[in-house]
Amino acid sequence: MTTQQETAPGVPDPEPLVSAVIYADHQLRITHRSGPNLAVVQLIGEIDVTNTTGVAAALARAWRGGELLDVDVARLSFVDVRGLGMLAGLCREGWVRLTTVPPHMRRLARLLDLEGQMLGSRPH
């Protein structure tokens, strides 16, 4: 169901969200949704040694500077040690925040002692 909102006369329509694919390979797609007060990147698929560098570069391009880049990893079905290390490093640098982290990533982060870097003080 789609609803339409009417705006009062003289009030500009809200700016629409813009969604774009900013990276794609044979195993991963990265989408970026942005609006006036929102910027979210979603990782969909798998990160491994073959695409870690490309993923890091795509996230750097999506970052607005000055604020955290929210990276939704709920649909990331696999990440190897190198990919997890890259994500932890970006979090440690202070410009990436992982959201909706699935249990398999939490478990791997805990095993590699990266949980504090990736998830901060959030509950397990």
Image (spheres, helix red, strand yellow):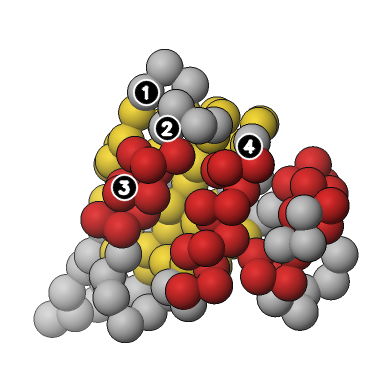
Judging from the image, what secondary structure is the residue with disc 2 in? loop
Q: State how far apart marks 4 and 3 are (Cα).
A: 16 Å
Q: State how far apart marks 2 and 1 are (Cα).
A: 8 Å
* Residue at the disc numbered 2: 51
Judging from the image, what secondary structure is the residue with disc 4 in? strand
First in sequence: mark 1 or mark 3? 1
* Residue at the disc numbered 1: 25
Which label number is shown at residue 79? 4
As drawn, 42 above or below 6: above
- Tag 2 near tag 1, CB within 8 Å: yes
Residue 104: percent from left, percent from top: 79, 42
Give, as a three-letter code, the residue at label 1.
Answer: Asp
Q: State how far apart marks 3 and 2 are (Cα).
A: 11 Å
- Quarter of the picture containing the C terminus is bottom right
- What residue do we see at 31% from left, 47% from top? 58
Residue 111: percent from left, percent from top: 84, 52
